[in-house]
Amino acid sequence: MPWTQVYDPLGHWWLSTIIAALPIVVLLGLLAGLRVRPHLAAIAGAVTALLVSVLVFHMPWQLSAMSFIYGVLFGMLKIVWIVIAAVYLYELTVHTGHFEVMKNSLANITSDRRLQTLLVAFCFGAFLEGCAGFSTPVAIASAFMVGLGFSPFHAAVLNLIANTSPVAWGAIGTPVHTLAGVSGLPEGDLNAMIGRILPITCVIVPFWLVRAVVGWKETFEITPAILVVGLSFGSMQFFWSNHMDSNLVDIMAGIFSLAVTTTFLLFWKPKTIWRFPHERDTGVATAGARSVGAAASVPQYTRGQIAKAWMPFAVLSVFVLLWGLPTVKGYLNQHTTPHYSPKGAENGWDFPVIQKQIRRDAPVVKAPTPENIRYDFNWFTATGTACFLAAIVSGLLLRVPIREMFQVFGRTLYKLRFAIIAIGCMLGLGYLTRYSGMDAVLGLAFTRTGWFFPLFGTYLGWLGVALTGSDTSSNALFGSLQKITSDRLGISSTLMCAANSAGGVMGKMVDAQSITVATAATNTVGTEGSIFRHVFWHSVALAFIVGIIVMLYAYVFQGAIPHGVKLHM
């Protein structure tokens, strides 16, 4: 018997909203307030969601339980597998000693910790986000920065902050494709509109990132480098999103920014080389610059040694890029994925019990719509498989014995055991809140803001990502709601649907999944609460900036909202 979601089960929208938020309050309260270990907090949050969905929202317990199980299984294949494979590749480079060469080669470009943050967390991380998405850059870049000598806490926080501006085009533009599908709006217009919002933040975020490491004086000291990073990335992001396609926006912007910044650093040096206070100064800083804090002696390597050390990440980039190309992915899916359909709508198996048994209703959608819940078991074309194959190929090229590769993989699994439980439960919680209608209740509360809807609609996207850990999921969840509400208020639906995605990127740093991935990659499981408390206000403030930009487009620069943009797909 189909069940229809109820968006005001208690008869008072504010009370229903408070109850709908209870699972998230429990999860984050335990993590950030009581500092409970993340897998235990995730379990507690999931249990709370199960009870609220059944007792308050009157969701049949079978549907509630299977919604949670679906989320767990989704998380295992789509998220956990990426984290395991990415950390495995990193562990192989450490095991072979090549990671030392990698980090020292980067230190030879610049030993300044501020500039290293820009190169690794922002530029390299953006490229990884464009290739794979789903927390891949947080996992890989965080581990990379720990190897460079950053504290695990700093590495986790900085990569969470950096992994914002690129998120709207993560995993070969998947969020934009999803947004166009659920809203019914032209993908070219949505892509261009997002590309007229986020490039403005591409200068703000690098400043913000450096300021999170040092004071204002030290931040302004490297203003030229920050501007080069932000303007090169933002200009390419704008150009590609407005004139090319939605697939390669972040990949091209990341490569362009990394190349331009590296070239710039060959000719420009900061007045002082800033390093962490605990690092001992040996007096070998960059030529022409004074060392502050420290500058350790950096070994020199041949080009061949450097190329061999970086080879695993080059292989990783090739694999994730190929796995993301529609033609390659389609061909591999056709030959490896069970029940694969080129049309996409009928991929995978009908998920037991819940397939088309849960219906969304007005005002979230125009008419009652059953949820098409299928499990797409794309075991070979999953991004995690691309990362794993890259690790295997890299291990073979580095001549690591097969037995040692198995041993390293075993150590990786053991190291990530609690993170696997936490991520699985958090994804189960996210999908349960979606299918029970709890997240829609939270979203509807933002639609009661009238003239301020452009600002709060932006926070609606932020909320979606904070809850689900995915800009794609946030767009799938609230894209239709944004269109319906903006049409009612006489605001551009193209702008507000784009705002959902653009605002959502700033929620990426506070979602429990990303924080858990960061702590797993930096081997600091148990510090999730501290990290959440540290990045929360960064996230809220950056989302506010995006909201102000959206309001300016809505009421001042309406002529800049695109109509009829054609992409070169």
Image (cartoon, helix red, strand yellow):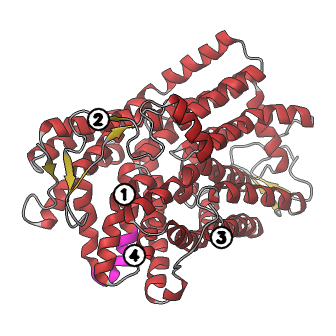
Sequence-first disc among 3 and 2: 3
> Amino acid type of disc 1?
Gly
Sequence-first disc among 1 and 2: 2
Residue occupying image coordinates x 49% and y 57%: 177
Sequence-first disc among 2 and 4: 2
Mark 1 lies on residue: 464
In space, the residues marked 4 and 1 are separated at their CA atoms by 18 Å
Q: Quadrant of the N terminus?
A: top left
| Mark 3 neighbour class, 10 Å CA radius: few under 14, some 14 to 19, many 20 or more | some
| Spot occupied by residue 408 in the image (x, y as percentages of width and height) | 61, 18
Sequence-first disc among 4 and 1: 1
Front disc: 1 or 2: 2
Instruction: State left or right for residue 151 relative to residue 225.
Output: left
**Given contact means CB atoms under 8 Å apart, are the residues at marks 1 and 2 in contact?**
no
Residue occupying image coordinates x 44% and y 30%: 338
> Amino acid type of disc 3?
His
Mark 3 lies on residue: 243
> Amino acid type of disc 4?
Ser
Sequence-first disc among 1 and 3: 3
